[in-house]
Image: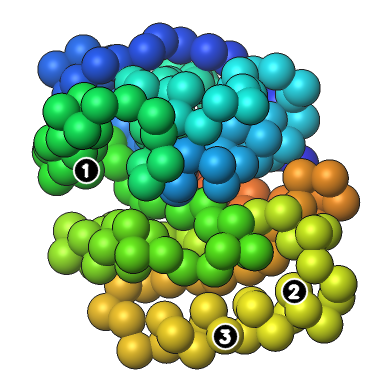
Amino acid sequence: MNPLYHRAEYLLNAPNLKTTPEGIEYEVAFAGRSNAGKSSAINTLTNQKSLARTSKTPGRTQQLVYFKLDEQRCLVDLPGYGYAKVPPSVQQKWQKELERYLEKRKALNGLVLLVDIRRSLGEFDIQMIDYAAHLNLDVFVALTKADKLNRNGAKNTLFAVQKLLKDSTANVQVELFSSLKKEGIEQIHNWLDEHLNVAEIISKKKP
């Protein structure tokens, strides 16, 4: 693991685009249904137990939660969708703020979409991928909780999702992921390295 991820620390909560931090050049957002395991994935990818607070109540994250990797790079935990136990009016407000963030945030350079492998792609997931394609955002689809299925079942689901997205106009990479088994971490880190322009850090360190 690049030490950059282990150095991640909580930066701030942003209720809307106007309150997002200035000076960030590269950020990747984590999206998914409220019970897809976003917080667990962020903790696993940063090798920290409680960087992103997990909850047994889906929909707990109601703002853009920023985690700083360095002065120019951040990971962003987006509000979960599709299951949150909140009034429809609140969900509509989240939706508008999310769209505004995805469309207007110049530092946003990619989207990691967390999908519970036992549910596969849902309507909201497909909409998110299509929306990312419209905005020319690359997408990494992580099929979370892969340890909940046997190996053949997990592989079959992976192939099915890859086939489903084969003709998508989005630039999509799909991989199995398990926080428990530490599966898929290298693949996401490699993707994050590219979309956070980590190579720039390495080149600056060279004499």
Q: Quadrant of residue 107?
A: top left
Q: For the point 46% across and 54% down, which residue is it?
A: 113
Q: What's the mark number on residue 160?
A: 3
Question: Where does the image place residue 78, in percent across and percent down from the top left?
Answer: 38, 34
Indicate which disc, 3 or 1, sits on the residue closer to the N terminus.
1
> 24 or 121, which lies in front?
121
Dot 1, how many residues are within 10 Å of its Cα: few (below 14), some (14-19), or many (20+)? many
Quadrant where the N terminus sits is: top right
Q: Quadrant of residue 43?
A: top right
Q: For the point 64% across and 50% down, which residue is it?
A: 189
Callout 2 amino acid: Ala
Q: For the point 37% across and 42% down, which residue is it?
A: 81
At mark 1, the secondary structure is helix
> 201 or 177, which lies in front?
177
Question: Where does the image place residue 45, in percent across and percent down from the top left?
Answer: 68, 39
Question: Where does the image place residue 175, in percent across and percent down from the top left?
Answer: 63, 68
Per the image, the residue denoted by label 2 is: 154
Per the image, the residue denoted by label 1 is: 102
Indicate which disc, 3 or 2, sits on the residue closer to the N terminus.
2
Closest to the camera, between mark 3 and mark 1, is 3
Dot 2, how many residues are within 10 Å of its Cα: few (below 14), some (14-19), or many (20+)? many
Residue 143 in view (yes/no)? no
> 190 or 119, which lies in front?
119
